[in-house]
Amino acid sequence: MTSTFTPQTPIWCSGCGHFGVETALKRALAELDIKPHETMLLAGIGCSGTIQNYVSSYGYHALHGRVLPTATGVCAANPKLTVIAAGGDGDGYAIGCGHLIHTLRRNPCMLYIVMNNGTYGLTKGQPSPTAQGRADQEHPVDMIQVGLTIPGSSFLARGYVGQSEQLDRIMVAALEHVRARRGFAFVEVISPCVTFNDIFPSCGGDLVNVEPDQGYDRGNRTAALMRCAELNVQGKLATGIIYEGTASTFEQGYGISEEKSPAHQDISPVANAQAYDRQVMRYRI
């Protein structure tokens, strides 16, 4: 904990699933001994968008739907940091959906946690893109299934706050994936809103852990996609580490490294005088 910031008490409703996400993230950071000054947690808009106030780390509150490009910028500026982005299903799958698609294909080395409760809780209960039981109006989206169709995606998992042991394991595995510089870890967490969309009573029957399936290979993208699609037809969602593979990363593609990162360059006028002169000369007639 720094001398300038003390994590605050969450403002979430009693019983909110987000408490389980916060706990799992803190446990994973502690288990992997990731220090606060080595961690950057960025959050979006909505009830979930306050999580960066509750974790001892660097924090940033991004614009609505823009947490992923902001977090990608942090990855580029300082690869030494463990970068974590967090938000809700409205922030990530509605206004931020385009950014999620492009982050999946770019594969930057960071963790993205989406707290999915199927509702816009902060604005009092409008249905989100993942809302269930509205097939006569709009079909719910499964962004894990979408992620499996995108070349470049390298880690896709889903947990549930009611199954803390599995969620803890997923969070640790996701952070390990990121810190090994293997790319983007996308973790969706089913995190019910007890005020506007309390799905705790039904969650257990709607979620299927695919990891124990006989012959399931989480390194097989096609098989993972088929299994998710099969469950979706049944009105169910896959949980567990659904896919883990390899792909070139955003940092590799642009030659970003700890040694060459902008955050660690000498930007003093003396060190860059010749470079400044060269830039000025370009504009002289």
Image (spheres, rainbow, N blue to C red):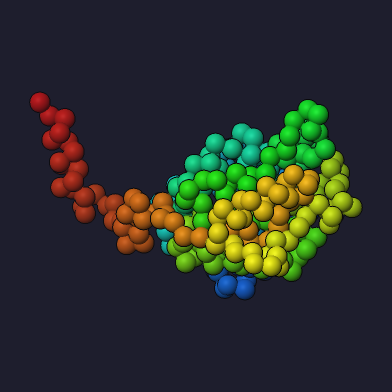
Instruction: Identify the residue at horizontal 85%, vertical 48% (top origin).
Output: 199
| Placement of 212 over or under 61, stated as above or below | below
Check the picture and name the quadrant holding the C terminus: top left
User: Between residues 11 and 258, which one lies in front from this camera angle?
Assistant: 258
Q: Is residue 189 left or right of residue 250?
A: right
Residue 227, relative to residue 165: is it above or below?
A: above
Residue 48 location (% of width, % of height): 70, 47
The residue lying furthest to the right in this view is 201
Q: Residue furthest top?
A: 285
Residue at image point 15% right, 47% down: 274
Residue 151, position as x, y percentages in the image: 48, 48
Q: Position of residue 160 (x, y in %)?
A: 75, 57
**On the rendered structure, is 181 left or right of 16?**
left
Classify residue 29 as left or right of residue 76: right
> Residue drawn 29% across and 52% down?
267
Q: Residue furthest left?
A: 285
- In this rendered view, identify the residue nearer to me: 28 or 283: 28
